[in-house]
Image (tube, helix red, strand yellow):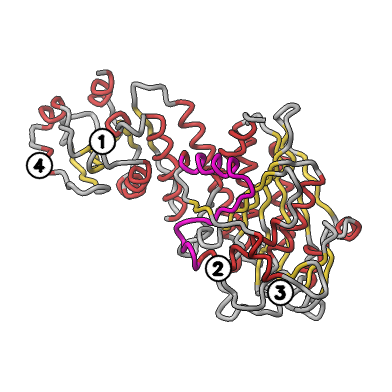
Amino acid sequence: MKEIETIYKETRNILYPLYEEDDIEKELVEALGADIRAMIIKEAGKTTTITTLGRLACERIVFLFLGSRQDTDREAVCSCAEGVFDSLNAPFVMWVDKAVNASMDAHLITSCFIRALYGKAYIKKKDDPDITFLSEEDLTQDVQTAMIYADGKKYARRLSDLPPNVMTPKELCQQAVALAQTYGMKCRVLSTAELKEMNAGGLLAVSQGSAYPPYLICLTYDHGGNAPYQAVIGKGITFDSGGYNLKSRTSFGMKYDMCGAADVLGIMKILAELRAEVNVYGILPVTENLISQQAYKSQDVIQLMSGKTIEITNTDAEGRLILADAITYAQRLNANRIVDIATLTGACVTALGNVYSGIFSNDDAFFQSFSDSMKQTGERGWRMPLDAAYLQDLTSNCADLRNAATGNGKGGACVAAAFLSQFIETDVKWLHIDIAGTSDEKDCATGAMISSVANFLIQEAQQL
């Protein structure tokens, strides 16, 4: 076995995954001259550090106990990878093949470890781990791809974590322009005058309380030849006070109301770094939802880009207004597959907590493809009902729709999705991802659904 020969000569420390059914390599046991297995902490995710005392070229071997081979799946491996982070305070070589089981090959395990370890480094505000992956398989492409995904996710998280006096609508716009310039993407920023001409009444109304103008930003990544364009849209409210329907408890954490927009920029970065053969519009409706003499009010009636009129019943239901305009804009660009990502409703947090994102779709096959993508990336999403019955709560006497229910307030995430569905044209496949509960955790952005959406867009392009 080539790996054991390499281990003997390796001067960097070794990360050795171990299942409860497996014995430690006989050569290592003999070289170290001790009953190592008896020393191992036999609890999944726990590490045991053995000092080699000069009997091997490396100084330490860190054994990572994975538990039962049969019970260890992707989620368990990622959890173990995060747990081992604190032990990797020096350059390490991971013996990947020791973690292989029936459901996970060396390629998948490598990807899991990179994404988990680099994510943990961001949370702990530490440098990325210096780790190399040893396997009989060629893992070069897997490492490069996983690093690109991890870097795109980290980029989006950094944007989201900036304070709202720094990450203003203007700053988010500048970040989008800079990203486009770096990767040679086209970037159009619609001015207030253009938005008025296009009758983008949702974005214009929400922005009235802000000192900054609204922005509708469109990045174009065009490496898919003659294939149709897909669109990914991210809600970009850089701070949400709730407007005149002021948030009843606290607005702490509302800087994360632009995580959808940041996620879209992370996705576009990943596509560009991968040189993915896709055509994608990345669309960001960007503003703040604040109070001022000019701010929009409850019972205002506005007209959106689609031509539909909306009675404002809740100024804190602003995200769906700016998304509706962005969806209409994407369809005017002839995008026939649309994904929107938004920290949209507290109701989704109530329903799913901070574990699952809420997924809505108007097409079963489209959703199933996205579900497959989530399984590949290890992210969690739960399909929620998209039903016209929820529209009964949005009936208005003076407009086509209300922007929020005024009655019992039940099923709020489903009501919001039903509202957005009214702006989806026939034959357009659509996914709405509510990341209100998963976008941040312990005052740190998560980059929720970036990996799944980027992977999904690439796989969908192969079907066009």
Q: Is disc 1 placed on a helix, strand or loop?
A: strand
Q: Which label's residue is closer to the chain start, 3 or 1?
A: 1
Q: Residue at x 49, y 53 (%)?
A: 382
Determine the CA span between mark 3 and mark 4: 63 Å
Q: Is disc 2 placed on a helix, strand or loop?
A: helix
Identify the residue position indicated by label 4 in the image.
38
**What range is drawn magenta here?**
350-375
Which image quadrant is residue 76 in? top left
Q: Quadrant of the N terminus?
A: top left
Instruction: Determine whether 423 is above or below 116 in the image.
Output: below
Which image quadrant is residue 75 in? top left
Q: Is disc 3 placed on a helix, strand or loop?
A: loop
Determine the CA span between mark 2 and mark 1: 44 Å
Q: Residue at x 51, y 33 (%)?
A: 145
Identify the residue position indicated by label 1 in the image.
16
Residue 303 falls left or right of residue 463: right
Q: Position of residue 22 (x, y in %)?
A: 18, 33
Labels 2 and 4 touching (C-beta < 8 A): no
Q: Quadrant of the C terminus?
A: top right
Determine the CA span between mark 3 and mark 1: 55 Å
Disc 1 residue type? Tyr
Between circles 3 and 2, the one closer to the viewer is 2
Disc 4 residue type? Ala
Instruction: Determine whether 121 is above or below 237 in the image.
Output: above
Q: Which label's residue is closer to the chain start, 2 or 4?
A: 4
